[in-house]
Image (cartoon, rainbow, N blue to C red):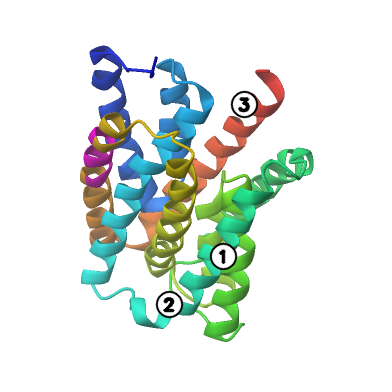
Amino acid sequence: MPFEPSLLSYALLVPAAAVAGFVDSIAGGGGIITLPALLAAGLPPHLALGTNKLQSSFGSLTAMLRYRSAGLIRLRSLLPGIAATALGAALGALAVGALDATVLKVLIPLLLLVIVIFLALKPRFGMEEGSRRLPWLPFWIAGGLALGFYDGFFGPGTGTFWAIALVALAGLDMRGATAHTKVANFTSNIVSLVVFALAGTVILPLGLAMGAAQALGAWIGSHMVLKRGAGLVRGVLMTMSACIVLYIVLRYWVIR
């Protein structure tokens, strides 16, 4: 018999999705709110993962369109990066069953801790645009393949890695980096969603209800980024990086 979430599950999960959409539109990491919530509501892991990708796609799309309307991104210039990210995400999703993620479970929390410490020691990092260290096209192709693969294969912290790379290598400020990150997030979300949908592991009514809340939260969050700028992104990015470290440690090492 197909799994059917209760009305109480909807009442808890929809607000959680709104909060996740708000946070994710600013600095990423919304999945550490919605995925544990879906699992806590009793969804089997495969259904939780698939439904989570559906609802998060609404948030990343809303934020992307909001930033595009504000002139922070030009989708035409990002087409090669979108294609590379889609390819990387597809390869990552296909590799899930073939590769051991143990190394990532150790390495990713350490990398995120380094990012938090680095941002604390460099208070001006990302506060204004800097020099571009890699040409735009090679950056997006290499970044899309690498981070797209990572998102399809493992996932936690993808938005953080994109933001830091866009500031450090592409010369954007935190606000511009967040806007461009949403393009990559939406691309890898859609690719992963297609994989889950083909496998029949998406609860459509729940995903759509949470998706609507995600979109609302993402619209509010992206509006705040446009209004308050890089300082807001920086603070939320540090907080979410620390939360992702805790999430990975608890999920993959403490709670078995």
Q: Main secondary structure of the magenta part?
A: helix
Horizontally, residue 207 falls left or right of residue 185, namely left
Compared to residue 209, the image places residue 38 above or below, namely above
Which residue is rendered at x = 35% and y = 49% of the image?
Answer: 57
Residue highlighted by disc 2: 78
Looking at the image, which residue is at 36% across and 52% down?
26
Residue 217 vs residue 232, the one in the foreground: 217
Instruction: Calculate the distance from the C-alpha at mark 3 to the C-alpha at mark 1.
Output: 28 Å
- Residue 251's tag is 3
Q: Which residues are magenta?
A: 209-215
Q: Element type at marker 3?
A: helix
Q: What residue did someone put label 1 on? A: 87
Residue 28 in view:
no
The quadrant in which residue 10 appears is top left
Asked if labels 3 and 2 touch by Cβ distance under 8 angstroms, the answer is: no
In the drawing, what numbered circle is on residue 158? Answer: none
Q: Where residue 19 sits: x, y (%)?
A: 31, 36
Q: Is residue 169 above or below residue 36?
A: below
Tell me: 151 left or right of 38. right
Lower position in the chain sequence, tag 2 or tag 1 = 2
